[in-house]
Amino acid sequence: MVTLIHTLADHGDDVNCCAFSSSLLATCSLDKTIRLYSLNDFNELPYSPLKVHTYAVHCCCFSPSGHILASCSTDGTTVLWNTQTGHILAVLNQPNGSPVRICKFSPDSMYLVSGAADGSVVSWNMQTYKLFRCGSVKDGSLVACAFCPNGSHFVTGSSCGDLTVWDDKMRCLHSEKAHDLGITCCDFSSQPISDDDYGPQFFRMASCGQDCQIKLWVTTLSDLSADKPEHEPKQFIETWSEEEVSSWLCAQGLEDLVSIFKMNNIDGKELLNLTKESLTDDLKIESLGLRSKVLRKIEELKVKVKSLSSGIPDEFLCPITRELMKEPVIASDGYSYEKEAIENWITKKKRTSPMTNLVLPSLVLTPNRTLKMAINRWLETHQK
């Protein structure tokens, strides 16, 4: 039995989305506002409506704790709100300023994913409110997103019908045409499959489309990772599309250059041929520091390709020196480095991570004995 208990009619235009926390209901609308209501009596909170977006608000969602509300809009921003006060915590600008259609928190509240009309998908660090990783799909707007319950991977759905699976480091693990006329929604079951047919690490997922179909899927991070361990096809950089170059730029912290590279049709082949002169004269990048960083990242990319072609596993190479590690240590960002290289980095660069550019929560370096043993075994095998 279903009984209507209340009707809310405060918005002045179409209501696009609603979301619950343990104590609140949030709604967002084409009227550019977000409204918050108490679940006790459905009265609107004193600081509601929330007004900062300059165009329609497409989606809103609560963090798992309910302390933060995210809203995303045609204005190209995702805004984070304190649900206790209604104050703005951060305004996250989508690369290229594309209209943001969907936003979703990870189950542990560490990250927020935003998907936009140009196919860009961004993972934001919720401790620093900074961009963590970004990627993109080939066609269509991103209109749906859902996290696996354990946070190991998430899926996005596009208006062209593509369903894409990403891991927690924003590597594209799998993509396929799921619905002919576009995806409208996707979600995971909260419980893993635990019977003998699949095992405990598999999760059910459903996708809905404009083709009048609902499709049920089973996903697991281990199998997907085995199929496609890297989002970036490093060995074949010359074959990179413009979108793959854009994804690489975002991963290097160079998201501000995405629009310039796209405007000049820079694909993988063009990327490898960029010079100091072409960055200055052709791409009109005025900042000397930015030009130097781009050239340095391209050189690192070339070294990485060379190491891959020589057969040295990439995880054995220090991300700073791109040389085989002798004394690998784990930093607080979770990455392994050559001890001397990361110590010098910390001395010169203070507390930033070489991989994420975020502040290191700790300067403690822990010897990675497992990795050192693996490198030694590899050397014994390949130096005979």
Image: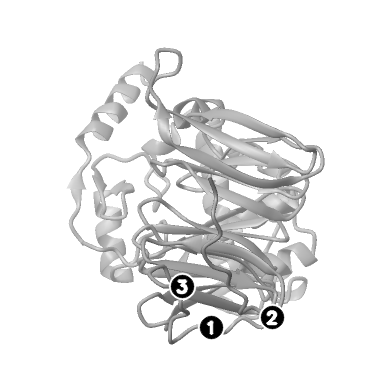
Q: Nearer the viewer, residue 118 or 69?
A: 69
Residue at mark 2: 12
Give yes or no for contact between labels 3 and 1 (Cβ–Cβ under 8 Å). Answer: no
Which of discs 3 and 1 lies nearer the camera? The answer is 3
Picture coordinates of residue 355 (x, y %)?
41, 56
Q: Residue at x 29, y 22 (%)?
A: 377
N-terminal of the pair, mark 3 or mark 2, is: 2
Give left or right: position of 27 versus 261: left
Residue at mark 1: 49
Picture coordinates of residue 14 (x, y %)?
71, 71
* Residue 276 visible in image: no
Quarter of the image where one finds residue 93? bottom right
Q: Residue at x 56, y 85 (%)?
A: 51
Picture coordinates of residue 85 (x, y %)?
37, 82
N-terminal of the pair, mark 3 or mark 1, is: 3
| Circle 1: residue type | Pro
* Residue 46 visible in image: yes
Quarter of the image where one finds residue 40? bottom left
Q: Could you give the CA–CA distance between mark 3 and mark 1, rounded to whole angstroms?
A: 14 Å
Residue at mark 3: 42
Q: Is residue 74 above or below residue 375?
A: below
| Quarter of the figure that contains the C terminus | top left
Q: Is residue 7 above or below residue 141?
A: below
Describe the element under mark 2 as helix, strand or loop: loop
Q: Residue at x 44, y 76 (%)?
A: 81
| Circle 3: residue type | Phe
Picture coordinates of residue 38 (x, y %)?
41, 72
Q: Could you give the CA–CA distance between mark 3 and mark 2, rounded to whole angstroms?
A: 18 Å
Q: Which mark is residue 17?
A: none
How many dots with numbers?
A: 3
Describe the element under mark 1 as helix, strand or loop: loop
User: Badge 1: few (under 14), some or many (20 or more) residues near its Cα, within 10 Å?
Assistant: many
